[in-house]
Image: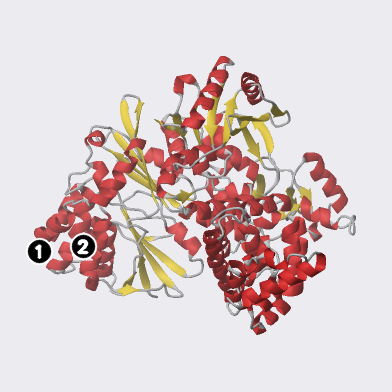
Amino acid sequence: MEKVIVLEEGADLDALSCAYGVQLLYPDSKLLRPKQLSKKAGEVFRDFKDFFRIIEELPPEFDLILVDTSNYKEYLEKLKGRVRSVIVYDHHPTKLECCEGKVEQVGSATTLVVEELMSRNVDITAESATLLSFGIYEDTGFLSYEGTTSRDARAIAWLLEKGANLRLIRKYLLDTWSKEQIDTLSKHLHSMESLFLNGKRVLIVVLKSEDYQPDVLNILYELREVKSADALFVIVSAGYKTYVFGRSIKGEFDVESVLERLGGGGHSFASAVKLEGVDAERVKSVLTSLLEGKNPPLRVKDVMTSPPFVLHQDTPVSNALLELSQRNFAGAPVVDDSGKLVGIVYKKNLLKVAKHYPYGRVKDFMVVDFHQLSPEDFIWKAEEILSHYGEKLIPVVENSNLVGVITRLDLLYSIREQTAEIKAHEKVIKLPTHVEETAKQVGTIAQELGFRAYLVGGVVRDILLKKEVWDIDFVIEGDAIKVAQRLAEKHGVDYHPFEEFRTAHIKVNGLKLEFATTRRETYPHPGAYPLVEYAGLKEDLLRRDFTINAMAVCVNPDCFGTLIDYFGGLRDLKDKLIRVLHPLSFVEDPVRILRALRFAGRLGFKLSKSTEKLLINAVSAGLIAKAPKGRLMNELRLALREERIFEILELYKKYGVLEHVLVGIRWSPQLEKKLLSLRDVIAWHRIEFPKEKIDYGWVYLLVLLEESEKGMDFLVDISAPAWVRETYEDIKKNKKELTKKLLSAQKNSEIYLLLKNKPLPFLLILMTEEDIKEKVRVYLEKLRSVKVDLEKFKGLSGRQLGKAIEEEKMKLMDAL
């Protein structure tokens, strides 16, 4: 059986050296070409790649060899059925249940392999000794780090006897740092936070990058601030993954005992864990809670509903509906006579069949293909399932017994609890002059009433982007309606309260102001209108869609102009990224899928890697179809009003969203060509006729619907303006025939007669047809504006005058 060595993503020199040693131990083993290595490991691999036996793809069946990691369960799950046995060489203590190899606590995984070579009396070359020395020297800091053992020193002594080249070792291992690495680190150092725990000083740093740069950590470890601390935890957000590294600086703080709570492993002096789909700020909040001795919900058993409500498989549909409705449950696990879990039934499915099969049995309509969890699973595994598959609930099973269920609401509450420790990044910013005076008045009124007032959301984003703002949103920790009422009285204007939502609208000094009371929102099912409860500022911000829209500016006199950023919105704004606040964001409200693409298109931003993955999962799970049509159509209308509508449509296409919104539309090369042509036509029209105001977004939509048989139904559904519906009807009835006539038209007067009185949107769409584009352009630029000298027609009136003017126009046109 072929043996294959697989390295973890971002593997360091110790892992690479260990992999090479394994190839010396197992002559039939091969290394799967690593996708990503640390900077130093990458340099060594580049220069020594001829020493490795490399394959590009995994064979159908093989023995798996892991080095510098014992995370074999993850591989067994991913490669189910292909891995015959597992061999592990790792220096992080762990329990191996099914593996061969060697796992012992030493300073370097390579040491374990070298010991095997020594015991077998394997003769190695000086080059091999050098390549093995790299890993031991790196992971032990040239035998100086805590955790270094005498075994590491003996391994090095043997390698030196075999001719290890110290000059080459210095060349590759002595640190040289690039400007890019230093810039990356300096950009995030503001996040460094100190905790004082039982006389120990512990540092926490968050580094965010779309691409993981392991070598940045080496710079961090050299900082004076770090060297004087007792322990350091570094949280690295890289795309969809978050890494947490713990290091005991003085050897007196057990970092492993902390990170093992998150599923990590290692030594008491050096430990690490990799998480997927969990935001770095949230991890920091959880880590802070753990360090302070608190118990944040981490496992499924901490948040599941137990005992679960269940339905028997023979329950009649009508009875099951009644039971679910009385409890306001969307679904329930289904069990047989022995209490064994056999399926899940959803209220939505039962409602569809209740009329025709009221006495049918639950087992006939239940879902039998579902995921399940163990009480010991981490809650982010549940989040991954819900965000990827859009399921409403997941059964929790222990020893084949159903012990609980976990729902979206359970997870949203846990996310809220886990983010409780997040602290805001604060800095003072300058508000635009036309906003500043009104904001100060709002802040003063709020303070007099004992409230806190904040500018929030899109207005903060646009102020930071130096955009002009006239629609201003305030949130009030207190009573928004009272603040709006006082401001309206001060200016002698009306205000419009909405008691049900505790909001109010008012116009002051040319600004449209909206006041809202801070609140939290929960969604009963995907896309539903939210249930509203009172909450503080942080929770109000947590309910928002993206980090760049979840910032606030305090306007109370005691903190006026202070930017409050809990979730890294300012950094994402600078990095031009759209990032959701938590992994269930698109599941909670699928309309955010379209909003994410609208903001990305409008601002020229990218989706963060984690947000992109979540969005793709949500689209694949069909969540858009579960959103209320009215809210989807409203979002589409907003997109159609954007100046960069073409860029937004391109993103709709890229992520396969368009087909879910415009049912029956198929993106084709011909459609794309026509949209590109329309973009050029619109750019031309903006320049040539700046006074002709037209909502170009509707013109794009008309092109998208041109080949659809249900286009008019769609336009009625979204309450499109009358001119849009009329233009669509004109296109469907007359475009083909008109195009043929224009092709054969020889004179300008013929073109004029064919196109006069046609609506401008129709004409712009005609210009996307290359064969007639020039003729329509001539009409718009010249023919429609031809004037005649009325002095020639004195004495004529009525029809005679009209006919004479038209005939004269024709002559003038044909003479052009």
Q: Find residue 219 and report its image quarter.
A: top left
Give the foreground label among 2 and 1: 1
Q: Quadrant of the N terminus?
A: bottom left
Q: Is residue 54 above or below residue 354?
A: below
- Most foreground residue, 494 or 664: 494
| Label disc, if present, on residue 119 of the rendered structure | 2
Query: Does the image show residue 147?
Result: no
| Label disc, if present, on residue 138 of the rendered structure | none
Q: Quadrant of the C terminus?
A: bottom right
> Which of disc 1 and disc 2 is earlier in sequence?
2
Question: Are there few (<14), some (14-19), or many (20+) residues within 10 Å of tag 1?
Answer: some
- Most foreground residue, 163 or 738: 738
Query: Does the image show residue 444?
Result: yes
Q: Find residue 404 and report its image quarter.
A: top right
Classify residue 337 as left or right of residue 49: right
- Residue drawn at 83 percent across, 48 percent down: 321
Classify residue 203 as left or right of residue 154: right
- Most foreground residue, 151 or 662: 662
- Image x and y of residue 46, in percent: 24, 67
Helix, strand or loop at mark 1: loop
- Image x and y of residue 636, in percent: 65, 54
> What is the CA distance from the residue labelled 2 to the residue labelled 1?
18 Å
Classify residue 148 as left or right of residue 578: left
Classify residue 475 as left or right of residue 664: left
Q: Which amino acid type is marked by label 2?
A: Ser
Question: Are there few (<14), some (14-19), or many (20+) residues within 10 Å of tag 2?
Answer: few
- Image x and y of residue 781, in percent: 58, 67
Q: Residue furthest front?
A: 795
Q: Which amino acid type is marked by label 1?
A: Gly
- Image x and y of residue 315, in percent: 84, 52
Q: Report the residue marked by disc 1.
A: 163
